[in-house]
Image (cartoon, rainbow, N blue to C red):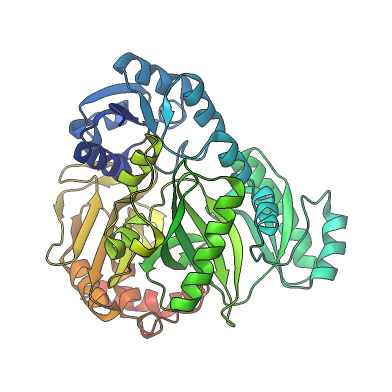
Amino acid sequence: MLQKVLVANRGEIALRVMRACRELGIETVAVHSTADSEALHVKFADESVCIGAPSAVGSYLNIPRLISAAEITGADAVHPGYGFLAENAEFAEIVARCELKWIGPRAELITRMGDKNRARQSAMEAGVPVVPGSEGVIADLDEALRLAEGIGYPIMVKAVAGGGGKGMRPAADPAELRRAWVTAGTEAAAAFGNGDLYLEKLILSPRHVEIQILADEHGHVIHLGERDCSVQRRHQKLIEEAPSPAVDEDLRQRMGDAAIQLCNHVGYSSAGTVEFLLDEQREFYFMEMNTRIQVEHPVTEMVTGIDLVKEQIRVASGAPLRFRQEDVEIRGHAIECRINAEDPQRNFAPAPGRIVAFHPPGGPGVRLDTHIYTGYVVGPQYDSLLAKLICHGRDRAEALARMERSLDELVVDGIPTSAPFHQQVIRDETFRRGEATTHFLDEHIGQISEAMAAQALG
């Protein structure tokens, strides 16, 4: 087993990794910027190292400083969490070259599966269904227009290095494709340093359903069921649940088998997520693979009882998986709401500031993963995620009831948060029936906004 892990991250995910390490008897090292000197992950770690200025570029994205922090503290492994450098193959490779253990998949797999075009090709090679589209990177707009006629509109323009909704634009006709081509390419080049694009057929009214996998370094792969992440804003997930209301046991097995096929084909190890689009005919298509722990991993933990972060660490230590596929059992239902420092009544504008009062919800089946406290200052430098509220019940109805109660109990005073938005979504009849697709928010934002405004007025 590893002895000391440097957590190359901040916020709630840094705390989450540290808690897993403590249960395994592993020491932890926190890194922090000068802005985060009073952060909880710094206080909870066995050791801490300041790595730079408040900007992410000067601290959490500074690879030499992260490596130096690991070396001076005697860490023997690095856990990247999610975001920042979690899917940066160069960082993973440097960690390995410095004879530190990277808690995640090998660098070449991060490169292969992080490139959406190469990941798509890998899925096709593995016999996993993919959305009809171009065979590879498209040379120019003229080629895109020609291919789109063959694929058929509507089309989705996608960046090969995209993520978080960046570098993705829909097009219903050639005129829109011309605009989408320029916008997606420019956005992808700015965000990822790579403006290469490809095309996919746009699936109308899909659900976003992903399969959680665990794989060890001995060739064993299992899946832990699915998560439904269809409630999104600009391709950013807002609410996730497990299991999906749209998936039965037969479909779960078929999607799980497909995810395992892909992982076996590429030789994957560690925790990972294979993401699919599910159409109205219940056909599923590979979309992408995330080579890290996901923000929404707690809902899977709640319904399976398996600690994904601890298993990730055990796998990195060289241990075989402790579970077989037949050991995985889905119990009940879990829902997660991402509570962000954003004002949903001002188009989800970022809302930094000081938290003057904080009261977490509690009770049976309630989990709150957070790094905030009364007096905590939410800065403008980092992601706006404040907390993940997860509620588990014997069935979906009980999970919904607990989430509605918990959102009412949650108090974060001093700054606006997205909690009022979640309160209205949870009460929405389409969502309660389990019928939300990725277009849910586009179709319902008007009535949700009206309900939030009425709630604010008392």
Residue 214 seen by the camera: yes
| In front of the other: 26 or 190 | 26
Quarter holding the N terminus is top left
Viewed as shown, does residue 52 lie left or right of 410? right
Q: Toward which corner of the image does residue 99 lie, by quadrant? A: top left
The picture places residue 203, in percent across and down from the top left corner, at: 64, 73
Residue 418 seen by the camera: no
Q: Please tell me whether residue 211 is drawn above or below residue 152 in the rendered image.
A: above
The residue drawn where x is 20% and y is 34% is: 25
The residue drawn where x is 41% and y is 27% is: 59
The residue drawn where x is 31% and y is 22% is: 50
Q: Please tell me whether residue 221 is drawn above or below residue 443 in the rendered image.
A: above
The picture places residue 390, in percent across and down from the top left corner, at: 27, 62
State the residue lying farthest toward the top: 72
Viewed as shown, does residue 457 lie left or right of 337? left
| In front of the other: 282 or 38 | 282
Viewed as shown, does residue 116 lie left or right of 361? right
The picture places residue 120, in percent across and down from the top left corner, at: 67, 55
How many callouts does the rendering have? Answer: 0
The picture places residue 218, in percent across and down from the top left corner, at: 47, 42
The residue drawn where x is 33% and y is 37% is: 10
Q: Please tell me whether residue 16 is drawn above or below residue 49 in the rendered image.
A: below
Q: Toward which corner of the image does residue 247 lie, by quadrant? A: bottom left
| In front of the other: 326 or 455 | 326
Quarter holding the C terminus is bottom left
| In front of the other: 318 or 431 | 318
Viewed as shown, does residue 183 lie left or right of 281? right
